[in-house]
Image: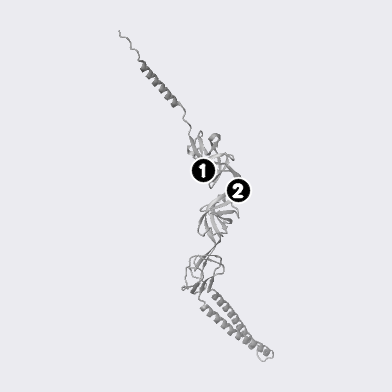
């Protein structure tokens, strides 16, 4: 009967070593991996007074605009400004050939001199006939005719005075002056051209841009927050609300407003579109965080709050309003707490963070 073979001692050692190595490998696999720290940027919750504003897109309009037209017909002799110049009220802008109007004035003055002489003669006749009619040297009918002739002469003189005033007025129209302080636009007519009184096309358009207005509209549901003389900003310019329309536009559900700006630095230009901010109230001691710290989830809005030991807490919050780059918090945070502003996508409630910057 064959004897059983004795196991090789070396093979047993190899098998034991393999089993030991396998056990160590399994043990290593069961060890927890090290937690990875997530790099983030943070900001503190700040408590401060925040102005509450209504924002809209506005259009800059000149305070006044005048299309300058000729009131007298004639040849344009001279233009006294350059296109785009600032002009003052009363400054001469255009000169029209005055010679026809000067001749008309001189003729009216000559007519006046002639008719005044006739009036003096008629009045002298009245004085003579007044004595004669008392002495019955002339009839009352003759005297009445002399008096009537004097009255007619007096009316002719009055008409001559009116004609002179009209001629002087027409002559004054040969100098066209600026009706306001403003800035000129493109010149429509050049010297040498014939201009007509009250022509459809203006000679130039002048816009008053100091001060200037900005027109904008707000939704009708915000009308209750709007009050006259409210502070308004447009870019870097500051002004006051000076106009609230008397009705809501039924097509858009908005109401038109206008704010006036002194515009001494010419920051606003007619026709320009600007972002308008109007202060309607102020929230005192408001809790404010950067708007990018606020995230939206299935349970609403939340932020990640950095806790001691660089741990984070996912905190549900209630937002009052976002204004520009800042969000006002109603509840859920306290002043001085630290919130994550960048890197939230890699965070979980069990994450550790590494603060950058």
Does residue 309 appear in this view? Answer: yes
Q: Secondary structure at mark 1?
A: helix
| Render colour scheme | one colour
* Residue 170 sits above or below residue 125 on the image: above
Of helix, strand and loop, which one carries label 2?
strand
Q: Point out residue 34 in the picture as x, y percentages from the top left corner.
A: 47, 31
The answer to which quarter of the image holds residue 173 is bottom right
Farthest bottom residue in view? 137
- Residue pointed to by mark 1: 292
Front residue of 240/293: it is 293
Compute the Cα span from label 2 to label 1. 22 Å
Percent position of residue 230, x then y: 60, 53
Q: Which residue is mark 2?
A: 282
Crowding around mark 2 (Cα neighbors within 10 Å: few <14, some 14 to 19, many 20+) is few
Classify residue 155 by image quadrant.
bottom right
- Precedes in sequence: disc 2 or disc 1: 2
Image coords of residue 208 (percent x, y): 54, 63
Residue closest to the eye, 304 or 121: 304
Number of on-image labels: 2
Which one is closest to the eye, mark 2 or mark 1?
Answer: 1
**Residue placed furthest toward the top:** 1
Q: Residues within 10 Å of mark 1 (few under 14, many from 20)?
A: some
């Amino acid at each position: 009967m064959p004897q059983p073979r004795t196991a090789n001692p070396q093979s047993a050692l190899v098998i034991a070593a393999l089993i030991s190595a396998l056990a160590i490998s399994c043990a290593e696999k069961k060890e927890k991996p090290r937690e990875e720290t997530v790099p983030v940027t943070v900001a503190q919750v700040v408590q401060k007074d925040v102005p509450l504003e209504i924002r809209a897109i506005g259009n800059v309009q000149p305070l006044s605009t005048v299309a300058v037209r000729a009131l007298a017909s004639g040849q344009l002799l001279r233009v006294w400004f350059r296109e785009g110049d600032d002009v003052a009220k009363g400054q001469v802008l255009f000169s029209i050939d005055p010679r026809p109007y000067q001749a008309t004035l001189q003729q009216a003055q000559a007519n006046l001199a002639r008719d005044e002489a006739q009036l003096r003669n008629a009045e002298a006749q009245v004085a003579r006939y007044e004595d004669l009619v008392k002495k019955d040297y002339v009839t009352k009918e003759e005297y009445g005719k002399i008096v009537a002739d004097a009255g007619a002469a007096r009316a002719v003189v009055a008409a001559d005075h009116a004609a002179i005033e009209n001629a002087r007025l027409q002559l004054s129209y040969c100098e066209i002056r600026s009706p306001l302080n403003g800035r000129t636009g493109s010149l429509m007519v050049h010297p040498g051209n014939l201009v007509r009184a009250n022509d459809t096309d203006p000679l130039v358009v002048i816009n008053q841009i100091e001060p200037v207005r900005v027109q904008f509209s707000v939704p009708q549901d915000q009308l209750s927050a709007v009050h006259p003389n409210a502070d308004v900003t447009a870019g870097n310019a500051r002004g006051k609300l000076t106009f609230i329309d008397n009705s809501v536009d039924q097509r858009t559900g908005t109401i038109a407003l206008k704010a006036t700006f002194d515009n001494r630095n010419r920051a606003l230009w007619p026709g320009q579109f600007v972002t308008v901010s109007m202060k309607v109230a102020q929230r005192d001691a408001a809790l404010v965080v950067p708007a990018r710290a606020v995230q939206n989830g299935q349970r609403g809005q939340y932020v990640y709050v950095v806790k001691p030991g660089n741990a984070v807490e996912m905190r549900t919050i209630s937002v009052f309003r976002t204004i520009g780059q800042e969000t006002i918090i109603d509840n859920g945070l306290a002043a001085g707490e630290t919130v994550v502003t960048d890197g939230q996508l890699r965070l979980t409630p069990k994450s550790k963070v590494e603060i950058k910057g």
